[in-house]
Structures are given as structure tokens and as C-alpha cells.
Image: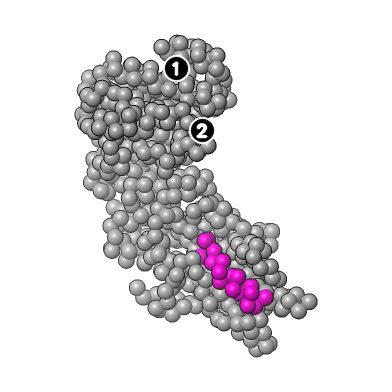
Amino acid sequence: MSLPEITGHQSAASVGSKTGAFSLPTSATLSIAELKATAKKIRRHIITMIGKAGSGHPGGSLSAVEIVTALYFRVLRHRVADPCWPARDRFILSKGHAAPLLYAVLAECGYIPLADLSSLRQLDSRLQGHTDCLLVPGIEMSAGALGQGLSFGIGVSLAGRLNSLDYRVYVLLGDGECDEGQVWEAAMATAHFKLDNLTVIVDNNGIQLDGWNRDIMNLEPFARKWDSFGWHVIEVDGHDFAQLIDAFGRARQVKGQPTVVIAHTVKGKGVSFMENNVDYHGKAPSAAEMEKALKELA
Amino acid sequence: MSVSLDMAPREAYGRALVEMGREDRDIVVLDADLSRSTMTHFFAREFPERFFDCGIAEQNMVGIAAGLAASGKIPFASTFAVFAPGRCFDQVRMSVAQPKLNVKLVTTHGGITVGEDGISHQSIEDLALICSLPGFTVIVPADAIETVQAIRVAAATRGPFYIRLGRPKTPLVYTEGYCFNPGKAVVMRPGKDVTVIAIGIMVAEALAAAKVMNEEGIDCRVLNMPTLKPIDEATILKAATETGGIVIAEEHLEHGGLGSAVARVVGKHHPVPLAFVAIQDTYAQSGKPAELLKRYGLTAEDIQQAVRAVIKRKQQ
């Protein structure tokens, strides 16, 4: 298994100590055990944030926890003290309803104070219901309307090529999001432009708002679709850090074509009554449910 | 750059892009398989590495432009006015307008003068759509000279721009040396009895109409309003106050374009009789541009009629 080069988090400690938000060991990268512990913390943040807000999307936030945690704490080259560092790797959250997940990860990194998380979805909070890149340092793209992130990622990737910067671009799509035609316009274009600095991760949790994908709008054969669009396809267990990290390392080695990591996940992962439960796509837990969920995530 | 009398604004645009591309390496151009018509192909030929043909996929093109802008580039994205913002409205809204990105949408073949291609290709709603988006600067140049100026201003000014050009060659209403001032109306002709506020190809019609009116003893002011948004409220109110009646002329539906903007301004601050020379709540049809302008009421004669009507209402 080849691991990717790790260069992130050099300045996380200093920023964190200034804002009082830093809650990580000062090592540049986390071990698998530390990643697992961080993932649990992030799940707790997600439940608490959405529970307090009284609305939001827990299912698709919980399903992508390992994906985004692996990226920020192991894979991405980024500087917390310099969110606009031109050479940073970019993470683009296309499925903007997973905003609580990204906010929690950015807070754990030190981009925003952990205390801000409790303001999710409230008037005058910078933590909008769906991500707003003008309000939160570290957020690359405003999202919420599905299907637009990969196109944006292509632009970022092309700019890197034009500027001779070797950053990588990671775009997280939902599987349900792939109903949108724009995703496939963009998939075609990414391969056409031979953007091997761009990696898509699909949070393949199998459920969209109205039900199981197979019942609402069948995506299969999903991997073959990406393959036929000219992508290098890797399939992993999206909750297995070692597999995810390995996949990102392998994507880095692929030249002349983009890579898609189809991450098989469980919607609502980590909270028994939310797992594979369509109801929790866009429903906040009640106070009692929140307590129960946090107990499971203790 | 030299803009010749017989150059369509879109050709002036294509040639200006090349000049600007030589001056600024951050300028990049995108098209959706219409580069021979939008004239971005001149840029593509000289700067192939900075030109991205996105194929027939306007939504993706706008998203790519947004990503380029977010990474410090100055993207000009072009297609027909009927396809942007029409085909990619939500992409323009969420990926460009909401994050206030530095994307320049320059569309061609606006209005009904696209002609024989018919209503699927006649963009009569684009200004209403794009003006609905907070933060967009919207410009409709009157001729090739103003087009080049507007394109340069767009490149030099941060933020989202929409510039709408037509298909046909249009008579020059300006001479070399004209300096386009964004957000400002231009007094094309002074006058005290009534004001015609025109935009795009209707500026030339308005000037022709004013000349006839003058012969009838009506002193007709003509304003060119190249920047539709943000609208020049001060000059509109000055016209309302000083001339007491306004005719608005535009190659667009009566609702949602220049007429709506002017009505909003005078309605709020200084109501005066208004008349609208625009396409009524209907779609047009195939035909030669001149035939269509006549059939759908967008000629100098239609402006004259509207002026007479406004003068009559003023006197009542």
C-alpha cells in the first residue's frame, strides 16, 4: 500500500492556540487510531449542531465523516493560518447539505473556533444551512444546489495547470447528486481535459431524500458509468481509513485521466437509528434522540 | 483597436479579447461550441492553452468559469444570449452571483434580430433573468465601439458581469475616442419636451426618431443606458423632472428589462407618463431582422408614436 505524501497542518497549532479552537495533537498527521477518534468527535459535533439547530441533514453528513476526516487530517496539503495559500490542495464539497460535517472538520482543524459550531443555521451566524464560501475560511465553494461542484473543480484544476501549481483538487459528490445532468457534463469534460490532478469521491450511501436510489433513480451500473466516461475508478469501503488513504495515494499515481473513488458508505453511519434510515436525510434529532445518539458515540 | 463601421459588435468583442489576452495572461475564455459565432475563435487561435471549449454544456461551462475565477483567473464565458443565463440560470446564481465571483458572461445573438432561426433562438427574457440576480453588472452596448469599451471595463472591474451583444452588424452611434463610463447614462442628444431612454440597437432607432420629432417641433432628449444594472437613477430622475415624460426602447420583453427598471425609479421618486417600446408578452417568429423589428414594434416609427402618446398625456 502506497501512502500519499503528507505535508499538511504545519501551522495548525499556532492558529489553534490563538483562537482557543485547536484540539488536535500537534503532529502533522494522524494515525489511523487518531483518525478514528477524530471521526467520533466529528460525529458528535454533527449530532449536537443539527440537534441544536432543529434542522439540517444528519444522514449525508454522517456517511462522509471518514472521507472528509481522512482528507483534512491525512491527505490534503493545507495551512490553517493561510486558508488562501495558492498552493493548497482544494477540497470542494459539492453536496452542500453536508455542511455540518465540513464545519466540524474545519473547526477541529482550527479554521474556525469550536464554539462557533453551536451557531449553525442561526440568524447572523457564518455557519449557514448550506456552505457559503464568503463567510467561512477554508470553504472553497458556496454549495447547496446539487450538481455544481465538479464543474467548479474543473475550473480550479485548470487554473492550477495554467499557473504551474501542483495542487490537487478533491470534489465530494453525493450519489443521489449524480442524478443531475451537470455532473455528467462535468465528468465528460474532466476526462476530456485529462485532469489527473482532480479526484472525485462519491459518498455512495445508497439513499436520497425520497428513498433508496435504486427505487427513485437507478444509478447502476455506477462504476461502469464513470469508467465509460474516461475515469480511473477505485471502489472502497468509505468508512475504512486505510482503504481511503490508500485510494487517494493511488489516485495520485494515475496520469492522464481523473480518478473517482466510489466510497461505499452507510447513510447515518454511527447512530444506530439513523443508519440506512431515509427519514434522517433531512431531519434533525429530537432532544431525546440527540441524547441517545451521543451516548452511542461516547 | 480599430473598430470599423461594418463590424458587428460580436466581432469587435472577439478581436478585443485577443488584444486583452496579449496584455493580461490571467484572461481566459470559455465557449460552448459556438466560438465561430460568438467570435471567441480569434482568441482560441492565438491562445489555445487559455481557451476552453466546453462543448454543448452551458451549465458546466459556467461552473468551470466560476472555478477559474475563484483561482484568480478572469474568465470570459460566451454562448448565445438564449442559453446564458437561460440554460444555466442556477449555475449563474449559485456558482457565480452568490459568491460574487469575477466571471464575465458575454453573450451574443441577443434579442429578436437573431432573425430566421426563430423563437427558440430569440433571447427576449435574458435581461429579466440576469437582472434578478443581486450583484450582477449588466451591460448592453449600443455599437461596436461601446462593446470594446465595455469589455475592457468588465475585465478591469472585479465582480460578475453580463454583457449582451447582438448578431447583426449595427450602425455606429459613437466615434473613436468615446469613453464608456459604467453605471452612467449618456446624453446622446439634448432635449426638453420628452426623453427617449434606449439600450442596445434601439439607441440608433431612438436617434432617428428624435430627428423626425424635432422636425415636428418636439424637442426630444435621447439617453443611451448601456448599463442596465446598476441603473443610473440620477440621470433618469433628471430626465423625468426636466422633460416630464419618458419613452423606453429595448429589444427585450416589456417586463423585466430597461422599461421595468426605469418605471421602478420614476415610480419611487418622480412619477411621469411612460411609454414602452418593447416586445409585448409574446414570442416572435422566424423572419429577417428588419421584418421582425417592424412586426414587433421596435422601429424608429414605433418610438415616434410612443413619443407623441407621452406628449399627449403630459398635456392632459
User: Which secondary structure type mostly characterizes the magenta part of the structure?
Assistant: helix
Where does the image place residue B248, in percent across and percent down from the top left? 63, 69
Q: Could you tell me if the residues under marks 2 and 1 are in contact, i.e. CB atoms within 8 Å?
A: no
State the scheme by which the image is colored: one colour
> Residue drawn 68% across and 62% down?
B280
Q: Real-space Cα distance between discs 2 and 1?
A: 23 Å
Rendered location of residue A190, percent (x, y): 36, 40
Q: Which mark is residue A121?
A: 2
Residue A164 in view (yes/no): yes
Q: Which residue is outermost to the right?
A: B316
Give the secondary structure at mark 2: loop
Q: Which residues are magenta?
A: B227-244
Per the rendering, the mark at residue B270 is none
Q: Residue at x 36, y 42 (%)?
A: A154
Residue B241 lies in the magenta stretch? yes
In the image, is residue B275 above or below residue A156? below
Q: Residues within 10 Å of mark 2 (few under 14, many from 20)?
A: many
Q: Which residue is mark 1?
A: A269
Please name the amino acid that badge 2 sits on: Arg
